[in-house]
């Protein structure tokens, strides 16, 4: 039997002299939330959780019942144990301070409880994304401003993927490791140690229906991929688009690839579709720790100084050599 996720975290904690067990406890609570979400997602129609909730979130997106349910599950699993000072979610306008009836801790967490939820009614993989930051030391009642930390300040980032297998993939800054849920035992076990993204790939992922709205560097890159050897590239390319970032990133971690949700002119008021604090930053931490690269095309995503909880950014991430090519096109090279 492989090492359990809890054993892995505790053994990793022993290598951190100042560790108090607080972080291990927090991660354990997040894992519990993901187990519950995996159950609800897996049961689906059997327990009446599919379909629309009839409400909109702060993004103006129609919420699925499971968007609301999974947000509640994540909050309830993490608010009571004294490891967190506050949380922030894609599904909530403002931050969620820990209620006064519970002790507060030294961490902040941002999360997308059910990323890709437009896929849930058609039974395609979805996921949960989370990012852990330290609450500023002198702060006892955190505000949204205390979350405005660049991605380089993340203590941990991870995702749960609710696919044919339920997996958790995470990094604490010492590489990336993947764990698979054994439903019979009710625990996650190490199945994908030291996940590494190949520097080269012949697979790109982008929503082609937005092509007319892309900036020129992205137009050029995608056109070259489509033309392959007939257009100056040394190889032909394949394309994927799942419309679930967690599934795309997991594929890239497993076999390489480049994922793009670039800035487009469809809505000039938006810098992109994906959100920095609970999609782009955690996924960038994971991708960089696996030897990949993550950029807006113009700057390293993890160095962006956030200006808002729900700030959107362009995302170009994955196999290093392909991301570097797209970045070079943005420089006009
Ligand atoms: P589109 C899901 O809504 C999401 O935030 C990401 O998981 C996914 O990569 C993207 O949006 C899909 O966007 O425009 O193709 O539906």
Image (tube, helix red, strand yellow):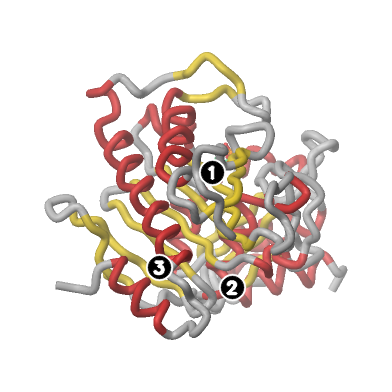
Residue at the image point whose x is 28% and y is 72% from the top: 7
Depth check: 296 or 17 in front? 17
Above or below residue 27? Residue 49 is above
Q: What secondary structure is marked by label 3?
A: helix
Q: Is residue 38 left or right of residue 312?
A: left
Ligand 1 has an atom within 8 Å of the beta carbon of the residue at disc 1: yes
Q: Residues within 10 Å of mark 1 (few under 14, many from 20)?
A: many
| Mark number, residue 231 | none
Determine which residue is flagged by label 2. 288
**Is residue 237 in view from this perspective?**
no
Spatial CA span between label 2 and label 3: 14 Å
Determine which residue is flagged by label 3. 254
Nearer to us of marks 1 and 3 is: 1
Nearer to us of marks 2 and 1 is: 1
> Which residue in the rendered view is the most extreme toward the top?
54
Determine which residue is flagged by label 1. 112
The numbered mark, 2 or 3, whose residue comes first in the sequence reads 3
Q: Is residue 99 left or right of residue 271?
A: left
Q: Position of residue 269 (x, y in %)?
A: 84, 36
Q: What secondary structure is marked by label 2?
A: helix
Q: What secondary structure is marked by label 1?
A: strand
**Is residue 288 in view from this perspective?**
yes
């Amino acid at each position: 039997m492989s090492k359990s996720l809890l054993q892995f975290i505790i053994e990793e904690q022993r290598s951190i002299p100042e560790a108090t067990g607080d972080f291990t406890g927090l991660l354990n609570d997040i894992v519990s939330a993901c187990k519950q979400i995996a159950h609800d997602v897996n049961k689906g129609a059997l327990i009446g959780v599919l379909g629309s909730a009839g409400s909109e979130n702060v993004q103006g997106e129609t919420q699925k019942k499971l968007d609301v349910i999974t947000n509640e599950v994540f909050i309830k699993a993490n608010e009571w144990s004294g490891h967190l000072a506050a949380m922030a979610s894609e599904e909530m306008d403002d931050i969620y301070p820990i209620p006064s009836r519970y002790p507060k801790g030294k961490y902040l967490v941002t999360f997308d409880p059910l990323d890709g939820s437009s896929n849930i009614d058609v039974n395609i993989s979805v996921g949960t994304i989370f990012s852990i930051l330290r609450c500023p030391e002198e702060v006892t009642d955190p505000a949204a401003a205390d979350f405005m930390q660049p991605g380089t300040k993340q203590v941990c980032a991870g995702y749960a993927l609710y696919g044919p297998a339920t997996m958790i993939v995470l990094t604490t800054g010492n590489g990336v490791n993947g764990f698979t849920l054994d439903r019979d035992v009710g625990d996650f076990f190490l199945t994908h140690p030291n996940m590494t993204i190949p520097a080269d790939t012949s697979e790109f992922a982008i929503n082609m229906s937005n092509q007319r709205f892309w900036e020129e560097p992205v137009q050029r890159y995608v056109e070259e991929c489509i033309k392959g050897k007939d257009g100056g590239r040394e190889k032909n390319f394949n394309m994927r688009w799942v419309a679930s970032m967690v599934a795309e990133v997991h594929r890239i971690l497993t076999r390489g690839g480049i994922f793009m949700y670039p800035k487009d002119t469809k809505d000039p008021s938006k810098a992109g579709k994906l959100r920095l604090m609970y999609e782009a930053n955690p996924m960038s931490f994971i991708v960089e720790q696996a030897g990949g690269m993550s950029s807006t095309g113009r700057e390293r995503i993890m160095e962006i100084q956030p200006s808002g909880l729900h700030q959107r950014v362009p995302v170009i991430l994955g196999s290093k050599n392909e991301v570097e090519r797209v970045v070079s096109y943005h420089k006009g090279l």
